[in-house]
Amino acid sequence: MAEIIQRDGTWAFDGSTVRITPGLHRSVPLFRQTYGEITVPLEAVSGIVHEPERKRGRLRLRLREGADPLLQATGGRLPDAADPYRLSVDVDRSGVAEYVAEEIRRALLLDQVPKEPAKSYLLAGPPVPVSVRSSDGTVSFDGARVRIDWADTSDRVKRATGPRIIAVGDLVQVEWLPNSGYEDGFLRFVTRETVFSKLPPEKDPFALDLWGSARRDLLTALVAAAVTARLPHPSVRAGEFTDRPPQPPAAVRVPAQADHHDVLLRRLRELGELHRDGVLTDEEFAATKAAVLKGFS
């Protein structure tokens, strides 16, 4: 057993798995504390590095592309402090950190773990049900459906449409960008019908606009990862290109012209009803309609 215990957390390697446990110190980000313990199988690891520095160094665990739904959903955009695969190391524990890194490297070599992208998720992702309250509303996921309940501060278009419920089978992908504190982020659920929509997050009824507490909004990555873990793995779509002429993946294939036209008309009808009911002002209606038309052009 190779183990290192630091203020930010504990990493323990038993020869087949790396067990990552977040620390209890108040400096540990809320996201790490909420995500909890992560068990990484050796087959999901592509490498590990120890980066010593004068005061505090770090251990970085590198996973194979496509192995972890959290990394797939966040696209490497998690802040360093919230990254579960990064551990700050005190200078007097550098020797222990290097020992842990060397043990993992030796096991990777002995087990001949491949470095190429994984063909399926090797980590389970966050458990469900999971629910997060953000600046734009509360998003919940029970393993089969996503539900968004808008906040009082959400855009009037969103509040007028009521709670949004999306079945996993209707989803194409999840898009996530963190709220940095300087620029807004978003959590967007892309369905077959909205794949062409280019509405801004603040007006998109399939997206949460993340503009409030960056610390709390970061928790939406839990939902993004949990949903991503239950969508087809990226390699499934990539595999469609091997035995037939190139064409868009089934999940995102451009619909027939008639279907495309029907979706556009339905969106415009919904906007027209909101305008007639006084939910949208003339300016809001014109701007939203222009965004919809541009998205379908």
Image (cartoon, helix red, strand yellow):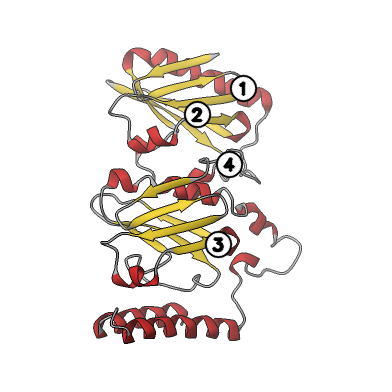
Crowd band around label 4 with a 10 angstrom C-alpha radius: few (<14), some (14–19), many (20+): many
Q: CA distance from mark 4 to mark 3?
A: 20 Å
The residue type indicated by label 4 comes to: Ala
Residue name at image x 43 percent, y 34 percent: 84
Three-letter amino acid code at the position of disc 3: Leu
- Which residue was labeled with disc 3? 171
Task: From this view, report whether residue 116 is shown above or below residue 282.
Answer: above
* Front in this rendered view, residue 5 or 112: 5
Q: Secondary structure at mark 3?
A: strand
Question: In the picture provided, is 45 more to the left or to the right than 219?
Answer: right
Query: Is residue 53 visible to the viewer in this orientation of the structure?
Result: no
Q: Residue at x 49, y 18 (%)?
A: 100
What kind of residue is marked 1?
A: Ala
Q: Which residue is mark 4?
A: 67
Are the residues at dot 1 and dot 2 in contact (C-beta closer than 8 Å)? Answer: no
Q: Earlier in the sequence, mark 4 or mark 2?
A: 2
Which sits earlier in the primary sequence, circle 3 or circle 1?
Answer: 1
Q: Mark 2 or mark 3, which has the lower sequence index?
A: 2
